[in-house]
Amino acid sequence: MHGTTRREFLKRTAALAAAGYGFFPGGAAVAQDAKAREKNDRPLIGAIGCGGQGTSIAGSAKRFGDIVAVCDVDATHAERANAKLADGKAEVFGDYRKLLERDDVDAVTIGTPDHWHAKIAIEAMQSGKDVYCEKPLTLTIEEGRLICKAVKETGRVFQVGTQQRSHGPFAQAVALCREGRLGEIRRILVAIGGAPKGGPFQKEPPASHLDWDFWQGQTPAVEYIRQRCHHDFRWWFEYSGGKMTDWGAHHVDIAHWALGADDTGPVSFEGMAEFPVPLEKGHPTADDQFNTATTFRVLTKFGDGVELVIADHIREDDGTDFENGVQIEGTQGRIFVNRGRISGKPVEELTGKPLPEDAIARVYKGKKHGDHMGNFFECIKTREQPVSDVFSHHRAITTCHLANICLRLGRPLRWDPKTEEIVGDEEANRWQSREQRKGYEIAL
């Protein structure tokens, strides 16, 4: 790499990846010569969004590289992350664009609220950086298409933070489905818990350490309410999709994975929900209260007749409830899986009839697995698609977005997974995107 700038090298390797050529840049390939590489063979990482989850994923990334830059619009978050992740030695930013200007940063973690994911991720890829971004990846269906386009154009490695794909019980559940141990899959029940009610809340001036205007980003500018920000942002449709996208991003993804539906989706949606404030044409009528659905049940159907039910809780035939997990039902049995257990007759039968030795490997298509962040950094070296790629996630989170559109508009929807259009409903189709505030538009 003598005589080659880091930026030129990044552009060259991104172009090769986009063209389909294999290469091995890794984090260390940015070194200007072999001697420099020997001194530092660890990727350099920037952490964007340093709240609780943002700091957590950056801390996981630190096992594989060095945190050299942190960014948050809340200065207290940024300084705390700097102390925790880099012993106070990282460069601190309030504007992520300044961090992306650093040519020495190989990869970024994005742990911002949902409404910032797409814009930051796309600009990070355009600046030559590989990306690990928290789920849900998008605020709208259109954002998912833009991110998929950016990945194809830049050739960057992109891992979505749906870490259940790297969790053993979920992979075992998928393998059981793929091996036919449940027979023909007929229905999947997904329980993701309800959302809280809250408000009316007090409007007040933001703290001096928070850039409230920048925090709002593409969303309409409103007066500051403490409960709109940080952890509670997920209960406002302006910034998120409530439990439907918060936990749906995990469990609906597993349902798609089990069905082999990583490149398609359901064709119909119908359901009902309760909202903490009345809606008018799908929009909340109050601006000082949580507004995402508190309870809900959506029935979706795939083209082959398989049903996917997404609800805050699922009541079994015997009257018992479960509030978090995935139940997969087939003609020969059913299994239940969540982060705490996997159960059901097909699981019990593994004692006498274990899965083939390569069953899990085939689920992962031969990729290294078991460590979600580790898989991301392995793929930075190999330039392979990670286990939670943007293309499969786009399909799963589209199911969640469509479920929310169905609930907010209060009517059934028909969806064409091939054209990615809502059939025969022009108004509902407009909900695939949102107007973005001037100065914060996503450009691609």
Image: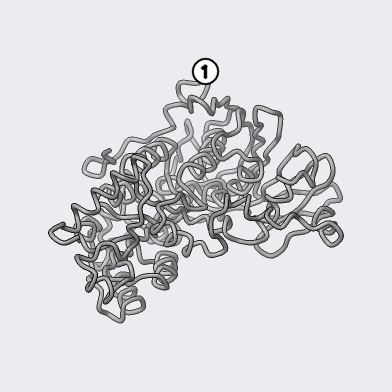
Q: Is residue 390 left or right of residue 343?
A: left
Q: Quadrant of the N terminus?
A: bottom left
- In this rendering, is residue 55 above or below 151? below
Helix, strand or loop at disc 1?
loop
Q: Quadrant of residue 139?
A: top left
Q: Is residue 118 left or right of residue 347?
A: left
Residue named by callout 1 = 424
Three-letter amino acid code at disc 1?
Gly
Q: Residue at x 54, y 49 (%)?
A: 249
Number of numbered tags placed on the structure image: 1
Residue 206 visible in the displayed image: no
Q: Nearer the viewer, residue 69 or 431?
A: 69
Q: Residue at x 32, y 67 (%)?
A: 43
Q: Quadrant of residue 337?
A: bottom right
Q: Nearer the viewer, residue 289 or 304?
A: 304
Residue 85 x, y percent position in the rendering: 35, 76
Q: Is residue 286 left or right of residue 164?
A: left
- In this rendering, is residue 175 above or below 19? below
Residue 127 x, y percent position in the rendering: 24, 51
Q: Is residue 306 left or right of residue 55?
A: right
Q: Nearer the viewer, residue 316 or 285?
A: 316
Q: Nearer the viewer, residue 219 or 137?
A: 137
Residue 311 x, y percent position in the rendering: 66, 45
Q: Quadrant of residue 112?
A: bottom left
Q: Residue at x 25, y 44 (%)?
A: 440
Residue 425 visible in the displayed image: yes
- In this rendering, is residue 9 above or below 47? above
Category of crowding for the residue at label 1, using alpha-carbon neighbours closer than 10 angstroms: few (below 14), some (14–19), many (at least 20) = few
Q: Quadrant of the C terminus?
A: top left
